[in-house]
Image: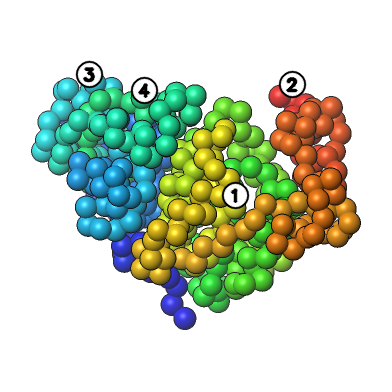
Amino acid sequence: MALVAPHGGTLVNRILSPDRAKAAEAEAKSLTSITLSLRESFDLEMIAIGAFSPLTGFMGKADFEGVCKNMRLASGVVWPIPVTLCPPDEVSAKVSVGQKVALKDDKGRLLGILTIQEKYAHDKNLEIPNVYKTEEEAHPGVKIIKNQGNTCLAGPIDVITPNHEPEFSDYRLPPAKTREAFEAKGWSTVAAFQTRNPIHRSHEYLTKCALEMTDGLLIHPLVGETKSDDIPAQTRMDCYKTLVEKYYNKDRTLLSVMPLAMRYAGPREAVLHSLIRKNYGVTHFIVGRDHAGVGSYYGTDDAQKIFDQFDLPKDIGVTILKFEHTAWCKKCEAIVSAKTCPHGPEDKIAPSGTKVRETLKAGQRPPVEFSRPEIADILIRWAQAAK
């Protein structure tokens, strides 16, 4: 059975062949340079490897407006969050439509070339309330947009190298490679789990429920830009690798990282995460409560409800697995949800994030019903070093 088609029908690849990359590198020496922000650098990588298919570059005005207003590109294809290049105003003032510019990382190293097809005003008053459902700068996504430039540069990118210092290169499989892995393993149905946190017992339960429904499981942590108070990617990866080694069927599980910057856009970001995973070859996507949320900006099940407005087979193309909040029930002696357990909250073990961090900093393991002891020990080392 063939794998699911990429979003838009074709898996994009904007990475130049060695010969073309060499020529582009020489050409770039005479071009105006633009230094990408951290988010823009990760977006460039996601475009280049096809994870953002059907995007071939940074969005033009029609796509930007369609995405903000209707969650659709100008072509009608579903896309929930703008992917834009908005350099500082003094930089965008120096370049024109039709011009090529060299795109560089924050260390001045060449990543690729953008051919500017459009230059348009960055309508932050359209983007912010539609995408983030708030205009408060306390929201990390809103703050980033407000600090971006007031002009967007749009056009296709030709990438020489998507990242000069890729984290976790052994686990950084692009969509073409995860698809190859799924085919080699004989998986026609694959469930994906998005995470930016260590996996605790409830997460483990969700992923294993999903695996009961499919041929394989992709544990797909985000290792791009996150909030400063999120647990570092290296610590999280240590947790994931330990968990997969000790508690998952390795013949049915693949661990790979995704180089995406978090937007913390809640419901819209849940849609984005599902489309990205389709590009990686996934057929089923786990959406828990408060997916990609931050603070209290979104309702706990808004990220699940947003999918109700789409024709899922046509618009999204993956099966959305909507899970309830889960926790360990002392009376059931198992991970449960409101669907499966008749007991009250007093019988549940689900400590708050604040309580867990206090426990870890004190060098103590959270309850084994909440976290595997090996994972707790990794987090204790991190928490004590961060004190």
Q: Which of the 4 quarters of the picture holds residue 358? A: top right
Q: Amino acid at mark 1?
A: Arg
Gap between marks 1 and 3 measured at Cα: 42 Å
Residue hosting label 2: 387
Foreground: disc 2 or disc 4: 4
Q: Between marks 2 and 4, how big is the CA–CA gap?
A: 30 Å
For residue 265, above or below residue 271: above
Task: Please state if 74 lies on the left or on the right of 266 as rendered.
Answer: left
Q: Within 10 angstroms of label 2, few (less than 14), some, or many (20 or more) residues? A: few
Cα distance, mark 2 to mark 1?
A: 30 Å
> SS for tag 2?
loop
Residue positioned most to the top: 90
Which label's residue is closer to the chain start, 1 or 3? 3
Q: Which residue is mark 1?
A: 289
Q: Nearer the viewer, mark 1 or mark 3?
A: 1
| Cα separation between marks 3 and 4 | 14 Å
Callout 3–callout 4 Cβ contact below 8 Å: no
Name the residue carrying label 4. 147
